[in-house]
Image: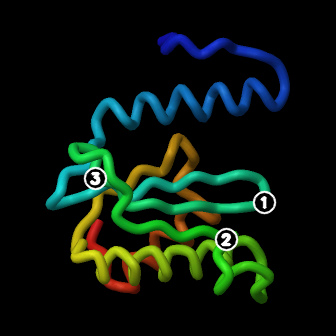
Amino acid sequence: MAFGVKIAKGDAYKRAAIKRRHIRVRKRISGTPERPRLVVTRSNRNLTAQVIDDIAGHTLASASTLDASIRGGEGDKSAQAQQVGALVAERAKAAGVEAVVFDRGGNQYAGRIAALADAAREAGLKF
């Protein structure tokens, strides 16, 4: 099941595995104007979420832990992920988006990824 991603050692192996999983997920998931794609990008320190219309190639809404309203906030990384989820849902609804397709970006649906998704659902986005 090689997707053209070289296997390396250590941390590079982990990134390659995430890339392979993301390619596998993206074969099935695509954002449309009616249901854009909610993409989550996770690093060790930060988390970014974007609502993307793949057909037009436009980002409709985005939020990150680097935003001024979230940066330096209280709580751990999961709490910040919840704030990002609520913020991206609020911005998506302001852009006229009611339902999205969730793209976890090759990451496991646990921890910060799940916290972001749950917060976005609570804020009114439909998955």
Q: Earlier in the sequence, mark 1 or mark 3?
A: 1
What is the CA distance from the residue labelled 2 to the residue labelled 1?
9 Å
Does residue 123 sit above or below 85 in this rendering? below
Q: How many marks?
A: 3
Between residues 55 and 109, which one lies in front from this camera angle?
A: 55
The answer to whether residue 117 is visible is yes
Q: Residues within 10 Å of mark 3 (few under 14, many from 20)?
A: many
Task: Give how far across and how far down residue 70 sits, in percent.
Answer: 67, 82
Task: Give how far across and how far down residue 104 sits, in percent.
Answer: 48, 51
Residue on which the image places disc 3? 53
Q: Nearer the viewer, mark 1 or mark 3?
A: 3
Residue on which the image places disc 1? 45
| In the displayed structure image, the side of residue 24 where residue 33 appears, left or right | left
Q: Quadrant of residue 123?
A: bottom left
Task: Give how far across and how far down residue 3 sits, in percent.
Answer: 49, 14
Q: Secondary structure at mark 3?
A: strand
Task: Give how far across and how far down residue 55 sits, in percent.
Answer: 22, 43
Q: Residue at x 41, y 50 (%)?
A: 103
Residue on which the image places disc 2? 65
Q: Are marks 2 and 1 in contact (CB under 8 Å)?
A: yes
In the orientation shown, which residue stands out farthest toward the right?
10
Does residue 24 sit above or below 64 in this rendering? above
| In the displayed structure image, the side of residue 37 where residue 68 appears, left or right | right
The answer to whether residue 79 is visible is no
Q: Secondary structure at mark 2?
A: loop
- Kind of residue sitting beneath label 3: Asp
Q: Residue at x 37, y 35 (%)?
A: 26
Q: Quadrant of residue 66?
A: bottom right
Q: Residue at x 69, y 14 (%)?
A: 7
What is the CA distance from the residue labelled 1 to the residue labelled 3?
27 Å
Q: Secondary structure at mark 1?
A: loop
Q: Earlier in the sequence, mark 2 or mark 1?
A: 1
